Image (cartoon, rainbow, N blue to C red):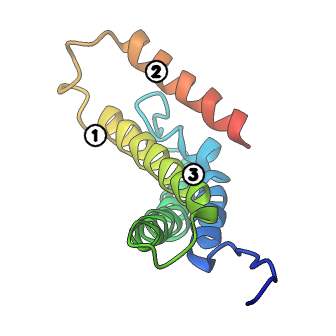
Amino acid sequence: MNNKIKSEKYSKLSIASLVTGILAIIPVPFFIYIDSDFAIPQHDPYAYFLSGLLLFVIMFYALPLVIAAIVCGSKDLKRVKASRYSYKGWKFDVAGIVLGSIIILNIALAWLISEFPEVLSFIPKDILVNIRDNLDMFLFSLL
């Protein structure tokens, strides 16, 4: 009979989910402002550069990390549910999935406000800005 205590370890997927979710939040304060308030003047090359840089950060930094956080978290949760891994890392999985989902919703809201303002015309603009600002404050508090 083996009297040794088996120490359960966190799975690598759960750690990857949490870490990529946290890393994906870092640029959020910078790409929040791709909305209708961030109007690009026609003659300002700095504004064009800044908007291009923000879009580059979203496409090649934030979105891959968000996708990785959600995929790693959901895969590991399926393995935990099938009893192939211990339950020790399931909170990391949930945190990675939640962080990734919040960031995707934030990107979608900023894109929807900037590209299709007529779709949200029934909602007063100050309420939309208030929603975005509250989401910003929530994400800043996570940092």
The local crowd at label 3, few if under 14, some if 14 to 19, many if 20 or more residues have their Cα within 10 Å, is many
Q: CA distance from mark 1 to mark 3?
A: 30 Å
Look at the image and tell me in which quarter the C terminus lies: top right
Q: Nearer the viewer, mark 1 or mark 3?
A: 3
Given this view, does label 2 or label 1 mark the residue nearer the observer? 2
Residue 127 picture location, percent across and down: 40, 12
Residue at point 28% right, 40% down?
115
- Seen from the viewer's position, the closer of residues 44 and 134 is 134
Residue 25 or residue 79, whichever sits in front = 79
Give 22 or 107, whichever is nearer the viewer.
22
Q: Secondary structure at mark 3?
A: helix
Q: Is residue 71 left or right of residue 45?
A: left
Quick check: marks 2 and 3 in contact, CB under 8 Å? no
Q: What residue is at 55 percent from the left and 62 percent from the top?
A: 57
Instruction: Please indicate whether residue 110 sits to the left or right of residue 93 in the image.
Output: left
Of the two numbered discs 2 and 3 on the same chain, state the one appearing first in sequence.
3
Q: Nearer the viewer, mark 2 or mark 3?
A: 3
Q: Earlier in the sequence, mark 2 or mark 1?
A: 1
Amino acid on which disc 2 is placed: Ile
Q: Specify the quadrant that holds the N terminus.
A: bottom right
Q: Amino acid at mark 1?
A: Glu
- Look at 66% across and 61% down and name the residue there: 23
Seen in the picture, residue 143 relative to 83 is either above or below; the reply is: above
The residue carrying mark 2 is 131
Q: Are marks 1 and 3 in contact (CB under 8 Å)?
A: no
- Marks 2 and 3, how far apart in space? 22 Å
Which residue is at a point 57% across and 51% down the rendered structure image? 95
> Residue 11: percent from the left, percent from the top?
62, 76
The residue under label 1 is 115
Residue 47 to residue 3: above or below = above
Q: Label 3: which residue?
A: 95
User: Label for residue 139?
Assistant: none
